[in-house]
Image (spheres, helix red, strand yellow):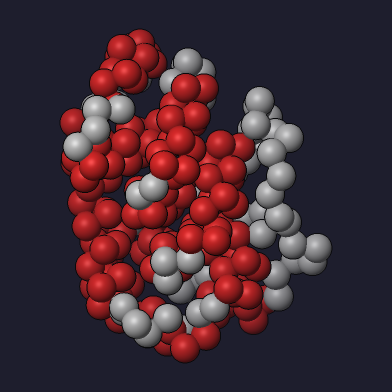
Amino acid sequence: MIHKGPFNDLTTFLNQDNLEKDFIDTFVIPYYMDIRKLGSQKNRLKNSIKAILPHINSKVVEKLLGDSNWRSRSVGSFLATLGNMMNYQEQIGRLLLKSEVTYAGTSYCLALAEFNNQESIDYLKQYLDYYLVQEDLWFDQGDAMGALAFLDKQNGTNNLEKYLKRWNDFVLNKPNWDLHKSIENFEKSLDELKEIKIYFSHKI
């Protein structure tokens, strides 16, 4: 599903060619589901990612983020976070705003929360400003709220409060959406990501 919205004209880089099968088999297939289920697959991901560690570089991350598939974009965002590649923050932030594909938004939000600067906070706020008033778009609003809550805790700010009423309105037709659970799950996933990042620090 491709979402068309007000951020459609934001520039993001796209690969000119499809990813090669060998590249997908090496950098995408073994990792994308464990990244999606980070909270429960931390140890397996930590062990399996050793295989590609020597090969993680900007060229690989750019190819992953420049693909149009949610699987490769999720892995690219995760690896950019793992390697603290802040030069991809704009691409990740714009991909979140555009929300062209499903499932990748969690990885974008994790990256922005880990980068933790004014630009990443602004991307999250722009996302919530628009997507919390789109009641029929069941996207990554919970993760964006979780990211903002985490950053408030880290930075001593109170950005989340502005969005609470909008969140309550947004979830009126979503009885299974729980803000406390979204915040708790997001923080757990981010803690797992940080643990993996520390484990591989100075190796990427």
Using the image, determine if residue 138 lies above or below residue 134.
Answer: below
Using the image, determine if residue 155 lies above or below residue 17.
Answer: above
Residue sitting at 26 percent across and 53 percent down?
189
Q: In the rendered view, does 102 fall on the left or right side of 176?
A: right
Quarter of the image containing the N terminus? top right
Q: How many marks?
A: 0
Residue sitting at 65 percent across and 31 percent down?
7
Quarter of the image containing the C terminus? bottom left
Instruction: Say whether residue 52 is visible.
Output: yes
Using the image, determine if residue 108 lies above or below residue 162.
Answer: below
Residue 4 position by quadrant: top right
Q: Percent from the top left, x then y, of residue 61?
A: 57, 69
The residue positioned farthest toward the right in the image shown: 16
Instruction: Say whether residue 71 is visible.
Output: no
Q: Percent from the top left, x then y, of residue 73?
A: 56, 57
Residue 65 position by quadrant: bottom right
In this orientation, which residue lies closer to the viewer: 94 or 33? 94
Residue sitting at 25 percent across and 77 percent down?
199
Q: Percent from the top left, x then y, of residue 176?
A: 28, 25
